[in-house]
Image (cartoon, grey):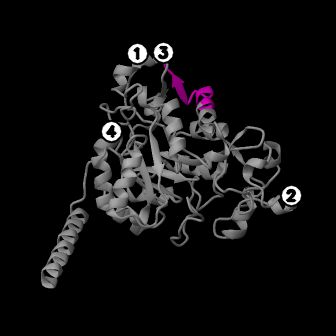
Protein backbone atom coordinates (compact mmCIF):
# COMPACT_ATOMS: atom_id res chain seq x y z
CA UNK A 1 0.00 0.00 0.00
CA UNK A 2 2.80 2.36 0.95
CA UNK A 3 4.67 1.42 -2.22
CA UNK A 4 1.63 2.22 -4.37
CA UNK A 5 1.21 5.59 -2.67
CA UNK A 6 4.89 6.37 -3.18
CA UNK A 7 4.65 5.48 -6.88
CA UNK A 8 1.61 7.72 -7.29
CA UNK A 9 3.41 10.61 -5.61
CA UNK A 10 6.51 10.16 -7.77
CA UNK A 11 4.45 9.98 -10.97
CA UNK A 12 2.50 13.08 -9.97
CA UNK A 13 5.71 14.99 -9.35
CA UNK A 14 7.16 13.83 -12.67
CA UNK A 15 4.05 14.79 -14.63
CA UNK A 16 3.89 18.19 -12.94
CA UNK A 17 7.59 18.83 -13.58
CA UNK A 18 7.23 17.75 -17.21
CA UNK A 19 4.29 20.10 -17.76
CA UNK A 20 6.17 22.94 -16.12
CA UNK A 21 9.27 22.36 -18.26
CA UNK A 22 7.10 22.22 -21.38
CA UNK A 23 5.59 25.62 -20.54
CA UNK A 24 9.06 27.07 -19.98
CA UNK A 25 10.44 25.71 -23.26
CA UNK A 26 7.24 26.21 -25.27
CA UNK A 27 5.37 29.10 -23.59
CA UNK A 28 1.87 30.18 -24.51
CA UNK A 29 2.04 32.70 -27.35
CA UNK A 30 -1.44 34.17 -27.39
CA UNK A 31 -0.52 37.43 -25.62
CA UNK A 32 -0.50 39.39 -28.88
CA UNK A 33 -4.02 38.26 -29.74
CA UNK A 34 -5.31 39.08 -26.24
CA UNK A 35 -3.81 42.58 -26.49
CA UNK A 36 -4.96 43.24 -30.05
CA UNK A 37 -8.55 42.86 -28.89
CA UNK A 38 -7.95 45.93 -26.71
CA UNK A 39 -5.69 47.99 -29.01
CA UNK A 40 -2.84 47.70 -26.48
CA UNK A 41 0.69 47.31 -27.85
CA UNK A 42 2.39 43.97 -27.40
CA UNK A 43 5.32 44.05 -24.97
CA UNK A 44 4.39 47.54 -23.84
CA UNK A 45 6.94 49.38 -21.72
CA UNK A 46 5.36 51.12 -18.71
CA UNK A 47 7.56 53.67 -16.95
CA UNK A 48 6.91 53.01 -13.26
CA UNK A 49 6.59 56.47 -11.67
CA UNK A 50 8.50 57.66 -14.72
CA UNK A 51 12.15 56.89 -15.38
CA UNK A 52 12.50 56.63 -11.62
CA UNK A 53 16.00 55.19 -11.44
CA UNK A 54 17.55 58.31 -13.01
CA UNK A 55 15.16 61.01 -11.74
CA UNK A 56 13.00 61.53 -8.64
CA UNK A 57 9.96 59.28 -8.87
CA UNK A 58 6.58 60.71 -9.88
CA UNK A 59 8.08 64.10 -10.81
CA UNK A 60 8.13 66.05 -14.05
CA UNK A 61 11.75 65.14 -14.99
CA UNK A 62 11.07 61.41 -14.44
CA UNK A 63 7.99 61.44 -16.67
CA UNK A 64 9.50 63.69 -19.33
CA UNK A 65 12.52 61.44 -19.63
CA UNK A 66 10.37 58.32 -19.91
CA UNK A 67 8.23 60.01 -22.55
CA UNK A 68 11.22 61.14 -24.62
CA UNK A 69 12.79 57.68 -24.45
CA UNK A 70 9.66 56.22 -26.07
CA UNK A 71 7.89 54.46 -23.18
CA UNK A 72 4.44 53.27 -24.19
CA UNK A 73 2.82 54.28 -20.91
CA UNK A 74 3.57 56.56 -17.98
CA UNK A 75 2.55 54.75 -14.80
CA UNK A 76 1.23 56.93 -12.00
CA UNK A 77 -0.41 56.61 -8.57
CA UNK A 78 -3.35 58.98 -8.13
CA UNK A 79 -4.31 60.31 -4.70
CA UNK A 80 -6.30 63.37 -3.58
CA UNK A 81 -5.37 66.39 -1.48
CA UNK A 82 -7.53 67.51 1.43
CA UNK A 83 -9.11 70.19 -0.77
CA UNK A 84 -9.89 67.82 -3.65
CA UNK A 85 -6.98 68.13 -6.11
CA UNK A 86 -5.86 64.90 -7.81
CA UNK A 87 -2.13 64.48 -7.25
CA UNK A 88 0.49 61.99 -8.43
CA UNK A 89 2.15 60.38 -5.43
CA UNK A 90 2.91 56.82 -4.37
CA UNK A 91 3.47 56.56 -0.63
CA UNK A 92 0.87 56.77 2.12
CA UNK A 93 2.79 59.59 3.79
CA UNK A 94 5.33 62.22 2.74
CA UNK A 95 8.37 61.18 4.77
CA UNK A 96 10.39 59.22 2.21
CA UNK A 97 10.30 61.51 -0.83
CA UNK A 98 9.97 65.06 0.49
CA UNK A 99 11.40 67.46 3.04
CA UNK A 100 8.34 67.09 5.25
CA UNK A 101 10.34 67.20 8.49
CA UNK A 102 11.75 70.61 7.56
CA UNK A 103 8.42 72.20 6.67
CA UNK A 104 5.85 70.37 8.78
CA UNK A 105 7.83 68.64 11.56
CA UNK A 106 4.72 68.04 13.66
CA UNK A 107 2.84 66.25 10.84
CA UNK A 108 5.30 63.55 9.82
CA UNK A 109 2.84 60.69 10.44
CA UNK A 110 -0.14 62.27 8.70
CA UNK A 111 -1.34 60.71 5.43
CA UNK A 112 -0.89 62.52 2.14
CA UNK A 113 -4.60 63.17 1.85
CA UNK A 114 -4.66 65.27 5.02
CA UNK A 115 -2.61 68.04 3.37
CA UNK A 116 -4.12 70.75 1.18
CA UNK A 117 -2.71 71.21 -2.30
CA UNK A 118 -1.10 74.50 -1.30
CA UNK A 119 0.63 72.72 1.59
CA UNK A 120 1.82 69.93 -0.71
CA UNK A 121 3.24 72.51 -3.13
CA UNK A 122 5.42 73.93 -0.36
CA UNK A 123 7.46 70.72 -0.15
CA UNK A 124 10.58 69.72 -2.08
CA UNK A 125 10.22 66.37 -3.89
CA UNK A 126 13.66 66.17 -5.47
CA UNK A 127 16.43 66.80 -2.94
CA UNK A 128 15.95 63.42 -1.25
CA UNK A 129 16.88 61.80 -4.56
CA UNK A 130 20.08 63.82 -4.89
CA UNK A 131 21.11 62.66 -1.42
CA UNK A 132 20.27 59.01 -2.10
CA UNK A 133 21.52 58.67 -5.69
CA UNK A 134 24.82 60.47 -6.08
CA UNK A 135 25.32 58.94 -9.53
CA UNK A 136 22.15 60.47 -10.97
CA UNK A 137 21.87 63.60 -8.81
CA UNK A 138 21.29 66.90 -10.59
CA UNK A 139 21.03 70.46 -9.22
CA UNK A 140 17.73 71.02 -11.03
CA UNK A 141 16.08 68.23 -9.06
CA UNK A 142 16.16 70.30 -5.88
CA UNK A 143 12.84 72.00 -5.23
CA UNK A 144 10.69 69.87 -7.54
CA UNK A 145 6.96 70.23 -6.96
CA UNK A 146 4.31 67.57 -6.65
CA UNK A 147 2.45 66.87 -9.90
CA UNK A 148 -1.28 66.96 -10.52
CA UNK A 149 -3.09 64.56 -12.82
CA UNK A 150 -3.77 67.45 -15.20
CA UNK A 151 -0.06 68.25 -15.38
CA UNK A 152 0.76 64.60 -16.08
CA UNK A 153 -1.68 64.62 -19.00
CA UNK A 154 0.06 67.71 -20.36
CA UNK A 155 3.46 66.02 -20.07
CA UNK A 156 2.18 63.05 -22.07
CA UNK A 157 0.99 65.42 -24.81
CA UNK A 158 4.00 67.71 -25.03
CA UNK A 159 6.70 65.54 -26.57
CA UNK A 160 7.31 64.20 -30.05
CA UNK A 161 6.48 60.78 -28.64
CA UNK A 162 3.09 60.70 -26.93
CA UNK A 163 2.67 57.86 -24.43
CA UNK A 164 -0.48 56.62 -22.80
CA UNK A 165 -1.28 56.72 -19.10
CA UNK A 166 -1.71 53.76 -16.77
CA UNK A 167 -3.32 55.17 -13.65
CA UNK A 168 -3.61 53.47 -10.28
CA UNK A 169 -6.29 54.50 -7.82
CA UNK A 170 -4.03 54.53 -4.76
CA UNK A 171 -5.70 53.74 -1.43
CA UNK A 172 -9.15 54.30 -2.97
CA UNK A 173 -10.85 53.48 0.33
CA UNK A 174 -9.44 56.78 1.66
CA UNK A 175 -10.83 58.80 -1.24
CA UNK A 176 -14.50 57.99 -1.85
CA UNK A 177 -15.50 58.77 -5.42
CA UNK A 178 -11.94 59.13 -6.71
CA UNK A 179 -12.72 56.91 -9.72
CA UNK A 180 -15.40 59.34 -10.90
CA UNK A 181 -13.07 62.28 -10.29
CA UNK A 182 -10.24 60.68 -12.30
CA UNK A 183 -12.57 60.05 -15.23
CA UNK A 184 -14.00 63.59 -15.00
CA UNK A 185 -10.51 65.09 -15.24
CA UNK A 186 -9.64 62.87 -18.23
CA UNK A 187 -12.87 63.97 -19.93
CA UNK A 188 -12.29 67.65 -19.18
CA UNK A 189 -8.78 67.41 -20.62
CA UNK A 190 -10.03 65.62 -23.75
CA UNK A 191 -8.01 62.52 -22.90
CA UNK A 192 -11.23 60.52 -22.87
CA UNK A 193 -14.32 61.46 -24.84
CA UNK A 194 -18.03 60.85 -24.34
CA UNK A 195 -19.83 59.36 -27.29
CA UNK A 196 -23.30 60.13 -28.58
CA UNK A 197 -24.31 56.72 -27.29
CA UNK A 198 -23.54 57.82 -23.72
CA UNK A 199 -20.44 55.63 -23.32
CA UNK A 200 -16.96 56.97 -22.53
CA UNK A 201 -14.29 56.15 -25.11
CA UNK A 202 -10.53 56.17 -25.28
CA UNK A 203 -9.84 58.50 -28.19
CA UNK A 204 -6.72 56.61 -29.28
CA UNK A 205 -8.50 53.23 -29.27
CA UNK A 206 -11.28 54.58 -31.47
CA UNK A 207 -9.45 56.51 -34.16
CA UNK A 208 -5.77 56.53 -33.34
CA UNK A 209 -5.47 60.20 -32.43
CA UNK A 210 -1.78 59.74 -31.59
CA UNK A 211 -1.15 57.13 -34.24
CA UNK A 212 0.71 59.37 -36.67
CA UNK A 213 2.97 60.80 -33.97
CA UNK A 214 3.95 57.33 -32.80
CA UNK A 215 3.88 55.44 -36.11
CA UNK A 216 6.97 53.31 -36.53
CA UNK A 217 8.18 54.03 -32.99
CA UNK A 218 6.03 51.71 -30.94
CA UNK A 219 7.36 48.43 -32.30
CA UNK A 220 4.84 45.60 -32.18
CA UNK A 221 1.50 47.32 -31.74
CA UNK A 222 -2.17 46.67 -32.04
CA UNK A 223 -3.39 46.84 -35.59
CA UNK A 224 -6.56 47.48 -37.48
CA UNK A 225 -8.45 44.54 -36.01
CA UNK A 226 -8.21 45.90 -32.48
CA UNK A 227 -11.16 46.26 -30.17
CA UNK A 228 -11.28 49.00 -27.56
CA UNK A 229 -12.25 47.01 -24.50
CA UNK A 230 -13.35 43.82 -22.88
CA UNK A 231 -16.87 42.57 -23.50
CA UNK A 232 -19.00 44.07 -20.74
CA UNK A 233 -22.52 43.27 -19.64
CA UNK A 234 -23.55 46.91 -19.91
CA UNK A 235 -22.53 47.96 -23.41
CA UNK A 236 -20.28 45.30 -24.94
CA UNK A 237 -17.12 46.34 -26.73
CA UNK A 238 -17.14 45.93 -30.47
CA UNK A 239 -14.84 46.86 -33.31
CA UNK A 240 -13.81 50.54 -33.04
CA UNK A 241 -14.88 51.19 -36.60
CA UNK A 242 -18.35 49.92 -35.69
CA UNK A 243 -18.48 52.11 -32.58
CA UNK A 244 -16.97 55.23 -34.16
CA UNK A 245 -20.29 56.48 -35.52
CA UNK A 246 -21.95 56.10 -32.10
CA UNK A 247 -19.02 57.78 -30.40
CA UNK A 248 -19.08 60.70 -32.82
CA UNK A 249 -15.51 59.99 -33.89
CA UNK A 250 -13.87 59.15 -37.19
CA UNK A 251 -12.15 55.76 -37.31
CA UNK A 252 -8.62 55.39 -38.68
CA UNK A 253 -5.45 53.46 -37.81
CA UNK A 254 -3.18 52.69 -36.12
CA UNK A 255 -5.17 52.51 -32.92
CA UNK A 256 -3.61 52.78 -29.51
CA UNK A 257 -5.44 52.52 -26.20
CA UNK A 258 -3.79 55.29 -24.25
CA UNK A 259 -5.65 54.80 -20.96
CA UNK A 260 -5.54 51.85 -18.55
CA UNK A 261 -6.93 51.92 -15.01
CA UNK A 262 -5.48 49.62 -12.38
CA UNK A 263 -5.74 48.97 -8.68
CA UNK A 264 -5.14 46.48 -5.89
CA UNK A 265 -8.80 47.08 -4.98
CA UNK A 266 -11.47 45.02 -6.71
CA UNK A 267 -14.06 47.53 -5.49
CA UNK A 268 -12.21 50.34 -7.25
CA UNK A 269 -12.02 48.34 -10.49
CA UNK A 270 -15.74 47.66 -10.33
CA UNK A 271 -16.29 51.41 -9.94
CA UNK A 272 -14.18 52.10 -13.05
CA UNK A 273 -16.07 49.39 -14.91
CA UNK A 274 -19.44 50.91 -14.05
CA UNK A 275 -18.35 54.42 -15.04
CA UNK A 276 -16.32 53.64 -18.18
CA UNK A 277 -16.65 49.97 -19.20
CA UNK A 278 -14.81 50.49 -22.50
CA UNK A 279 -11.54 51.51 -20.78
CA UNK A 280 -9.25 48.54 -19.93
CA UNK A 281 -8.64 47.68 -16.29
CA UNK A 282 -5.85 45.79 -14.55
CA UNK A 283 -5.99 44.01 -11.18
CA UNK A 284 -2.75 44.30 -9.21
CA UNK A 285 -1.73 41.33 -7.05
CA UNK A 286 0.83 41.54 -4.26
CA UNK A 287 1.01 37.85 -3.25
CA UNK A 288 4.57 36.58 -2.93
CA UNK A 289 3.61 32.92 -3.32
CA UNK A 290 0.71 31.69 -5.43
CA UNK A 291 -0.19 28.02 -5.82
CA UNK A 292 -1.93 26.71 -8.91
CA UNK A 293 -5.23 26.66 -7.02
CA UNK A 294 -4.56 30.11 -5.62
CA UNK A 295 -3.84 31.45 -9.09
CA UNK A 296 -7.13 30.08 -10.41
CA UNK A 297 -8.89 31.89 -7.56
CA UNK A 298 -7.25 35.18 -8.55
CA UNK A 299 -8.35 34.59 -12.15
CA UNK A 300 -11.90 33.97 -10.95
CA UNK A 301 -11.86 37.32 -9.12
CA UNK A 302 -10.24 39.19 -12.02
CA UNK A 303 -12.17 37.83 -14.98
CA UNK A 304 -15.51 39.65 -14.41
CA UNK A 305 -13.94 43.07 -13.89
CA UNK A 306 -10.42 43.18 -15.32
CA UNK A 307 -8.74 42.89 -18.71
CA UNK A 308 -5.36 41.98 -17.24
CA UNK A 309 -3.39 41.25 -14.09
CA UNK A 310 -0.29 42.88 -12.66
CA UNK A 311 1.89 40.44 -10.75
CA UNK A 312 5.33 40.49 -9.14
CA UNK A 313 7.95 39.50 -11.66
CA UNK A 314 9.39 36.60 -9.68
CA UNK A 315 6.06 34.72 -9.77
CA UNK A 316 5.18 35.50 -13.41
CA UNK A 317 5.64 31.86 -14.36
CA UNK A 318 4.63 30.70 -17.86
CA UNK A 319 1.86 28.48 -16.47
CA UNK A 320 0.38 31.53 -14.74
CA UNK A 321 0.63 33.50 -17.98
CA UNK A 322 -0.92 30.67 -20.00
CA UNK A 323 -3.82 30.30 -17.57
CA UNK A 324 -4.47 34.05 -17.73
CA UNK A 325 -4.47 34.01 -21.52
CA UNK A 326 -6.96 31.16 -21.38
CA UNK A 327 -9.33 33.52 -19.57
CA UNK A 328 -8.73 36.32 -22.08
CA UNK A 329 -6.53 38.23 -19.62
CA UNK A 330 -3.08 39.68 -20.28
CA UNK A 331 -0.34 39.78 -17.64
CA UNK A 332 2.09 42.58 -16.74
CA UNK A 333 4.95 41.76 -14.33
CA UNK A 334 6.35 44.43 -12.00
CA UNK A 335 8.84 45.90 -11.18
CA UNK A 336 11.33 44.70 -13.83
CA UNK A 337 14.68 46.44 -13.41
CA UNK A 338 17.31 43.84 -14.38
CA UNK A 339 18.35 42.59 -17.79
CA UNK A 340 18.06 38.94 -16.81
CA UNK A 341 14.43 39.54 -15.77
CA UNK A 342 13.60 40.99 -19.17
CA UNK A 343 15.21 38.04 -20.97
CA UNK A 344 13.35 35.47 -18.88
CA UNK A 345 9.97 37.19 -18.99
CA UNK A 346 10.23 37.86 -22.72
CA UNK A 347 10.77 34.12 -23.18
CA UNK A 348 7.74 33.50 -20.95
CA UNK A 349 5.68 35.78 -23.23
CA UNK A 350 4.84 38.50 -20.73
CA UNK A 351 2.54 41.04 -22.37
CA UNK A 352 4.49 44.04 -21.10
CA UNK A 353 6.94 45.32 -18.52
CA UNK A 354 6.38 47.71 -15.63
CA UNK A 355 9.83 49.13 -14.94
CA UNK A 356 11.76 51.91 -13.23
CA UNK A 357 14.26 51.65 -16.10
CA UNK A 358 12.37 52.13 -19.38
CA UNK A 359 15.57 52.88 -21.26
CA UNK A 360 16.96 49.43 -20.50
CA UNK A 361 13.77 47.62 -21.56
CA UNK A 362 13.40 49.68 -24.74
CA UNK A 363 17.05 49.05 -25.59
CA UNK A 364 16.55 45.30 -25.12
CA UNK A 365 13.76 45.36 -27.73
CA UNK A 366 15.75 47.72 -29.98
CA UNK A 367 13.19 50.48 -29.61
CA UNK A 368 15.21 53.44 -28.38
CA UNK A 369 15.11 56.63 -30.47
CA UNK A 370 18.01 57.11 -32.86
CA UNK A 371 19.31 59.96 -30.69
CA UNK A 372 18.03 59.31 -27.17
CA UNK A 373 18.45 61.86 -24.38
CA UNK A 374 21.87 61.83 -22.74
CA UNK A 375 21.79 58.84 -20.40
CA UNK A 376 23.07 58.75 -16.88
CA UNK A 377 21.70 55.24 -16.31
CA UNK A 378 25.09 53.56 -15.90
CA UNK A 379 24.66 52.23 -12.41
CA UNK A 380 24.35 48.65 -11.27
CA UNK A 381 21.09 46.79 -11.78
CA UNK A 382 19.15 47.40 -8.61
CA UNK A 383 15.62 46.69 -7.45
CA UNK A 384 12.91 49.34 -7.31
CA UNK A 385 13.13 51.77 -4.46
CA UNK A 386 9.83 50.71 -2.90
CA UNK A 387 7.01 48.25 -3.37
CA UNK A 388 4.55 48.97 -6.12
Whether residue 165 is visible, yes or no, is: no
Residue annotated with mark 2: 103
Secondary structure, mark 1, is helix
Q: Is residue 190 magenta?
A: yes
Secondary structure, mark 4, is helix
Q: Crowding near pointer 2: few (<14 within 10 Å), some, many (20+)?
A: some
Front residue (pair 84, 266): 266
Where residue 293 appears, as percent x and y from the top left, is 33, 60
Residue annotated with mark 3: 196
As measured in the structure, the alpha-carbon distance from the residue carrying label 3 to the one carrying label 4 is: 25 Å
Does residue 160 appear to the left or right of 250 in the view shown? right
**Could you say which disc has been placed on residue 36 in the image?**
4
Marks 4 and 1, the one that precedes in the sequence: 4
Residue annotated with mark 1: 245
Marks 2 and 4, the one that precedes in the sequence: 4
What quarter of the picture does the N terminus occupy?
bottom left
CB under 8 Å between discs 1 and 3:
no
Q: Nearer the viewer, mark 3 or mark 4?
A: 3
Residue numbers of the magenta segment: 184-195
As measured in the structure, the alpha-carbon distance from the residue carrying label 2 to the one carrying label 3 is: 49 Å
Where residue 69 appears, as percent x and y from the top left, is 51, 50
Relative to 158, say whether 104 is above or below. below
Q: Is residue 352 magenta?
A: no
Amino acid sequence: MRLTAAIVIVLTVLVTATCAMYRIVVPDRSAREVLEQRAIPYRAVMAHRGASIVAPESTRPAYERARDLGADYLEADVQRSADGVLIIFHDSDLQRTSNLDDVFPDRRDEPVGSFTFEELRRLDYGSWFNEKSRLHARPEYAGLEILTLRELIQIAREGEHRPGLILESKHPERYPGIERQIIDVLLEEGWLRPGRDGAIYDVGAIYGSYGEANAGKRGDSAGGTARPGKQSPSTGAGDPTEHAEHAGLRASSPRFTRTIFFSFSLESLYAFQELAPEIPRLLLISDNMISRRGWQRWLDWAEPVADGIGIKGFIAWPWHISAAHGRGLFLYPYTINSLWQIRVLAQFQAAGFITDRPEMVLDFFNRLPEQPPVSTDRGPQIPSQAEH
